[in-house]
Image (spheres, rainbow, N blue to C red):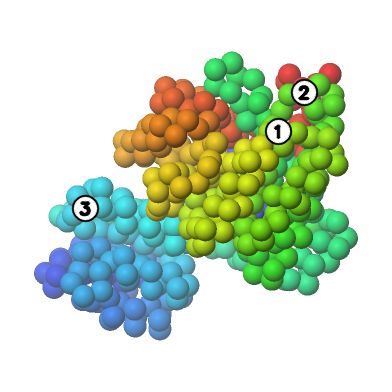
Amino acid sequence: MNTQKKNRVLLLDDDQFMLEYVSELLRELGVHKIWVAQDGATGLAVIKDMKRDIDLLICDIEMPGMDGIEFLRNIAVQGYSGNIVLFSGLDRQLLKAAERFAKASGLCVTGTLSKPVTLNALTAILMEIPQRQPAVKVKRSEDNALVSVKEVKNALSNDDFCVFYQPKVAIRNSRITGFECLARWPHKKRGFISPDKFIPVVEEYDLIDQFTLMIFRKSVQQLAQWLNMGFDLKAAVNLSMENLNRHDLPEVFEEVTRAAHVPANKIILEITESKIGKDIALCLDILTRFRLKGFGLAIDDFGTGYASMETLNNLPFTELKIDRTFVNAAVSDSSSRAIVESSVNLGKEFGLNIVAEGVENQAEWDLVAKLGCTEVQGYFISKPLPHDEFSQLNGLST
Ligand code: C2E
Ligand code: CA
Ligand code: CA
């Protein structure tokens, strides 16, 4: 198989027999270069020197000393950007948990292999790599074209940022209940830059208070227009955890809504679960006062964080948004389906509105409806739209 000649593989396993056996299979499959490491420290040393040359890392999760998870955490910090296949004799649930961890750390996991490794399974894994790698590389080099803080500051002072609106739809009657407000940066050379590229810069350089307030103002003004036109909608605005460091935030937001004559209960503030918990007392203080003023509070990207139950118990949420990775996987993967199902049950337990994010097709809609979600957001309904296109959506046009 000629494509595999290009592959250079690092194999990490504490079991000498496995190293020899899998190396032999890889050679049989025409792999061009194989490094082997019997422990995490050796693996890290190889990655440190060779990270640009390694096409694929095959990593055992279960190792004495530095285990697979610790190893993955380390290579994520080192910026390893090659493909990774995780393998283990452990049960599939643990392998999946490790895969989720690796992906959440920004690593590129191409697949998982259960022991005993077979020639067929290894062939399938290798076949994936030449197809994926160019895509990943192109995406990364474009994506990583960092936005500079200077550009962000300029864009802020020129008022270049705008807001796109993505509808949320009630499963019960397919009607639009509201929309999520998503920041966009129309850039002269690069088109619309996605928030993932500039929010980290905004946060890093203490511009997030100014940024959030600007997006909030624009979103509230747009909502006011639609409410005035007689459309009963709610607007959801994303907050960054870094915003929750000033006690007067609820008052500042209340002032904006009051000036626009928008009732606070038409606004939902979304907070990402994985970031909650740094300073729980301050979060509680601010979020509780938001609720007292009538704002709704959504826990965003639910399922990707860790302290789910505790967080829900402690903080006064009104809505739970199930992360799209679980929604997308649930149709074909029973453990993702179980995560969606238990998130729905948990949400219901706490009396929350439950939104399935990232619904992309009928099968996903049907499944989340069956599992008890109340609302759906995703490309199946519509991508985020500029305000004029949102106004044209069915049921909104006058
Ligand atoms: P998020 O809050 O989870 O927003 C949903 C993201 O999923 C949006 O990406 C949306 O375009 C995308 N999405 C919606 N439906 C689908 C679907 O069916 N399939 C797929 N593949 N994707 C879908 P976007 O707009 O790029 O925003 C990315 C993240 O940036 C947001 O994730 C949010 O965390 C953050 N963000 C966006 N606007 C703001 C903002 O004004 N302030 C803050 N602090 N963060 C923001
Ligand atoms: Ca959100
Ligand atoms: Ca989300």
The three-letter code of the residue at mark 3 reads Ser
Nearest the viewer among 218 and 378 is 218
Query: Above or below — where is 56 with respect to 348?
Result: below
Residue 371: horizontal and vertical position, in percent? 41, 26
Where does the C terminus fall, quadrant-wise? Answer: top right
Mark 2 or 3, closer to the camera: 2
Residue in view at x 54 percent, y 17 percent: 172
In this picture, is 319 found above or below 373?
below
Count numbered badges in the picture: 3
The residue lying toward the viewer, choosing from 101 and 113, is 101
3D distance between C-alphas at marks 1 and 3: 49 Å
The numbered disc on residue 266 is: 1
Q: Residue at x 81, y 21 (%)?
A: 230
Q: Is residue 200 above or below residue 161?
A: below
Is residue 394 visible to the viewer in this orientation of the structure? yes
Q: What is the quadrant of residue 39 in the picture?
A: bottom left
Q: Which mark is residue 180?
A: none
Q: Earlier in the sequence, mark 1 or mark 3?
A: 3
Name the mark on residue 231: 2
**Residue 14 placed where, x, y %?**
18, 72
Quarter that holds the N terminus: bottom left
> SS for tag 3?
strand
Tag 3 or tag 2, which sits nearer the N-term?
A: 3
User: Disc 1 and disc 2: Cα gap in Å?
Assistant: 12 Å
Residue 5 visible: no
Secondary structure type for disc 1: helix
Q: Which residue is mark 3?
A: 114
Amino acid at dot 1 = Lys
Q: Position of residue 82 (x, y in %)?
A: 43, 66
The amino acid at mark 2 is Phe
